[in-house]
Every structure is written in C-alpha cells, then in structure tokens.
Image (cartoon, grey):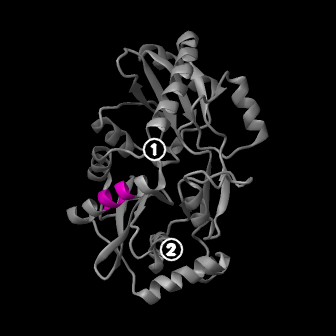
Amino acid sequence: MKDQITHPLQSIEWGEFRKKTGIKAIRTNDFQMTIHRIPHTSWTIGYVPKGPFPTKDMISELKRIGQQEKCIFIQLEPNIISAENLKLKIENLGLLPAAHPLFTKYTFVLDLNKSEEDLLKAMHPKTRYNIKVALKHGVKIVQDHSDRAFENYLKLTEETTKRQGFYAHTKKYHKLMWETLKSEKIDTDKLTAHLFLAKYNDEVLASWILFVYKNILYYPYGSSSISHRETMSSNLMMWEAIRFGKKLGLEKFDMWGALSNNNPDKNDPWYGFHRFKEGYGPKHIEFLGSFDLVINPALYNAYKILDKIRWVLLRLKK
C-alpha cells in the first residue's frame, strides 16, 4: 500500500488518530477506510478520503467490507486530478456523484522549488504589501508545540468558526489529533503536525497547524483573532509557512481546499479563505470529486432525504 498513499488522510498515523476518536479504521493493500456509525441505528457509512483511483478489484473489496460492516454506502474521494477519460472510468465502475461531498473538490498548490524571489514576484501585489505591513508592525512567527500554545490554538479556532459561520470539529477531535501527530522531528514517511503562532506584542493573533507528509506541506487548520487586523499577521504566517516548507526541502505546498475558480460565490463562508490563498500565486487544482458506492439502495435513498432535512434544520438552528 505504501506507493498508493499520496495524502495525509490515507496515512497510518491518521488512521491511528481516527481510532482514538472512536472511529473504526480498516487498512487493505490499496486503501484506508473509516467506518462511521449512523446514530441510533446499526447501520454505517464508509469513507475513503484521498485514496487511489478505484479499480474493479478495489470496488469488489469495498463491497465485501461494506456488507460486512453494514454500510449503506461508501464515499470515495480519490486524490486524483480531474480528467475526462477518468470521469468515464468512474461511471463504468458504478459509482454515483456523492449525495453529500465531504472533502473539497478544489485546492491551491504552490511550487516550493521556486526561489523566494520568484515566489514573491508571483504573488498578488496586495499580498506582498500585506507581508511588508506585518513585518513593519513587528509581527513574529514562532513554532511552538507547548500546551499553552495549543490552548491558544483552540481558543482562536472557536473564535474563528463563530465569526466565519462554518462548522468545525470538536475540541476533543483537535486535542486527539494534536496528541497523535505533533512532532518536533521531521520524518517525511510519517505524518507529522507542527504548530505556529503569529505574535504581536506578546498577543497571539493567529495560530496554524501544518502537516508534513512525503514531499508536501499541508495547511489543514488555521485560526485568527479579530484583534489588530491592521497588522496583517495571517499574511506573514502564510509566507513563513512557505519558507518553512522550503527549508525542509519539500516540493509542494497544498493549501488544503479552495472554491471553484469559475465565479466563486462571494457569499460562501470560505470565499475569504479562497481569496487569501489565491493571493500567493498557487496553481488551482480540480480533483475528480466525491462518489458514492451504494451498498443498500433502499436505505441509501432514505438516507439522502433525511440528510437533506438534517442540514436544513442545522442551518435554521445556526
């Protein structure tokens, strides 16, 4: 399976973390799948995030596991860049477009092989200016794995999610993730997590967790304070993250998510993040997308209806 693993969510370390959250993780020679129980039922949903392109043998194995684990369906989100010929192959495998995609179909990827000078030149002028503003204000970016630093991260994450109006994982989820993945050492064959703070006059204005895996740097979790927005601390944080990846000799920086580049919705809660990342001059990547392998058709149709109702109620509550 080693050569098949191309993303942190398929790593052994991620599987160990998910087990600590009470989620069953199953590994085969081709993929890692997590099993998620539907509350108050004996039924489950399977999830294969960022796995390989599915083959007939893989589909057969997924069906076998799905029946064994009482899955209504299994969602697959291949870590494969979109292409017309691959879309046709997906359809021939009997996979349906996902009823409720979980992972974003798009991301931004920055080439870390470029020099710092070339990277700065490729940025939007406003982004370069904001980095200079942060430096003039004396913002400092530090790597800090202490308990106090992580508590700051949790506090800012809660503040950010409330302000931006999107859903986030629980504190327990973040704590278990950090306990499992944090590391002062870098071993690119293992998934490791690294905590950075942006400080201004000893006040923490931004807190990010970066992943290092294989030859790629990832930005899965970030948070910021409403205080001292004029310092542009997050702009300097991104630049120092880029420099961190370059110092490690990594080849790419995956910014972990974007909106479609085709008229992105300005009302989308992720629009600000999309524009922020875009300012650094990365390449916009479109993946194949999310697909459902239906194991139990009758329950799958019922689940889709109930899931839509659930999300309507959640939005009304919010």
Q: Nearer the viewer, mark 2 or mark 1?
A: 2
Q: Specify whether residue 158 is painted magenta.
A: yes
What is the quadrant of residue 276 in the picture?
Answer: bottom right
Q: Is residue 23 above or below residue 277?
A: above
Q: Specify whether residue 174 is painted magenta.
A: no
Q: Residue furthest bottom?
A: 136
Decide: few, some or many residues near mark 1? Use Cα within 10 Å; few <14, some 14-19, many ≥20.
some
Q: Residue furthest left?
A: 147
Q: Is residue 302 visible?
A: yes
What is the quadrant of residue 33 in the picture?
Answer: top left
Viewer-proximal residue among 163 and 97: 163
Q: Is residue 251 above or below residue 203?
A: above
Looking at the image, residue 286 sits to the left or right of residue 163; the answer is right
* The C terminus - image quarter: top left
Q: Which residues are magenta?
A: 153-159
Type of secondary structure dominating the magenta stretch? helix
Q: Say what amino acid the circle numbered 2 marks.
A: Asn
Q: Position of residue 77 (x, y in %)?
A: 57, 37
Decide: few, some or many residues near mark 2? Use Cα within 10 Å; few <14, some 14-19, many ≥20.
many
Residue located beneath label 2 in the image: 235
- Disc with the residue nearer the chain's start (2 vs 1): 1
Residue located beneath label 1 in the image: 9
Q: Secondary structure at mark 1?
A: helix
Q: CA distance from mark 2 to mark 1?
A: 27 Å
Q: Secondary structure at mark 2?
A: helix
Residue lying at 68% horizontally and 23% vertically, measured from the top left: 93
Q: Say what amino acid the circle numbered 1 marks.
A: Leu
Residue lying at 41% horizontally and 27% vertically, measured from the top left: 35
Residue lying at 40% horizontally and 22% vertically, measured from the top left: 38
